[in-house]
Image: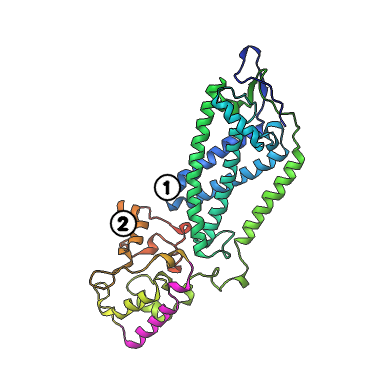
Amino acid sequence: MTLEIKGSQLDHAQAEQVPVWDLFVRLFHWTLVAAISVAALTGFVLGASWIRVHIVSAVLAVVLVTVRVIWGLFGPTFARFSSFVVLHPEKLRAHLDNLRGGKAPRYIGHNPLGALMVLALLLTILALGLTGTMLLGGVYKTGPFIDDLPYWLGWLSGVFHQLLAFGLLAMIALHIGGVIFESRREGENLARAMVTGKKTVAPGNVVAPQKPALVLPAIITAVLLVGGGAYWALVSSNEPPELLDGNGPRGMPVAEAQFDPVFAEECSACHMAYNPSLLPAEDWKKLMAGLDSHFGEDASLDDASTSQITDWLVANAAETADTRPAHLFSLPRKADGTIGAITDSKVWRELHDTPLENGAFKVKSVGSEANCQACHTDAVSGVFSPFNIKLPKE
């Protein structure tokens, strides 16, 4: 409940400065601003090589929000969710009606719209953390859901993750606009109040009943919740051997140690040994059937070797893996019905748009677009994780 007194604008003649936002709320607010800014920059602007920074900033944001939720249950008066008038729908409607009429009261804590925005921001950040973790598990085969999610669910989570990210940016813009609007309406700089922790209180303002902070229960809950979550993430990210196929999580490509010896010897003689999970079975059949004209070269082998390699490639083709490359790549078909190189496919060109523009493939240590292992340290594994991208210094 809140004590409501008629009046709205700040009466400076009878006003006094009182502490409103405690130290934790202020540190939380500005640290979250920094974490979300870094996450947005690395997610929307910078490349895949910044994925680690993106994840660290995202994890920090989720931890901050988790602790803020706990503080919203055990913190002092204005930090508590129980002081959020938005929890009373009729008061939210009344605030909107009064706001349009220019008679909305002045709240010392969050007004109903501000409280609604706070709740929406907290829930959205938590949802971003969940969908991001699911994306890593299902698509990139890493993180706590490494062995639990199929590719399609990870991909779908990635779509929601991006939509939520755009939604968060929109909410942040609305939040900033709301702060500017209320600062003008109330005659007080609300952003500065989040730095000093103090706001000006005058007769006629809406003030919530005082409640003490329950520090010890808050600390115990935070340690248990955050510590438990960290333990779960670490343990789940390292699946026990009995849950794996022998070389990684379920759906992983065949390991290099399990490569067919004839394939490894013959194919790596001219280029890197491409993991069979990069192409569907039909593409491998077409590729092996045309070795006499293998992208401008005669790579013919004896019938026995050709048959052995073909059978092994088909048996371990993209249909047997659940990784991102296995779902994305196929050889492009030319107008005359022949097949082109994987580096000519639309998907490959889009994924390498920036390196193509900055001339990365002209660097001596790279040599050609087909030399995947020059930048992807796990290229032979067929995973192509964003965590394993190492661009040449040149």
**Does 14 sit left or right of 393 as displayed?**
right
Relative to residue 44, is residue 265 depicted above or below?
Answer: below
Quadrant into which the N terminus falls: top right
- x and y percent of residue 370 in the render? 33, 65
| Magenta span contains residue 315 | yes
Q: Label 1 is placed on what type of residue? A: Leu
**164 vs 8, nearest the viewer:** 8
- Element assignment for label 1: loop
Residue placed at 74% from the left, 28% from the top? 209
Residue 356 in percent (x, y) is at 31, 55
Residue 107, horizontal then vertical, whole percent: 64, 26
Q: Earlier in the sequence, mark 1 or mark 2?
A: 1
Which residue is at a point 52% across and 42% down the rendered structure image?
36
Q: Which mark is residue 46?
A: 1
**Can see residue 26?**
no
Q: Which stretch appears magenta?
A: 301-322
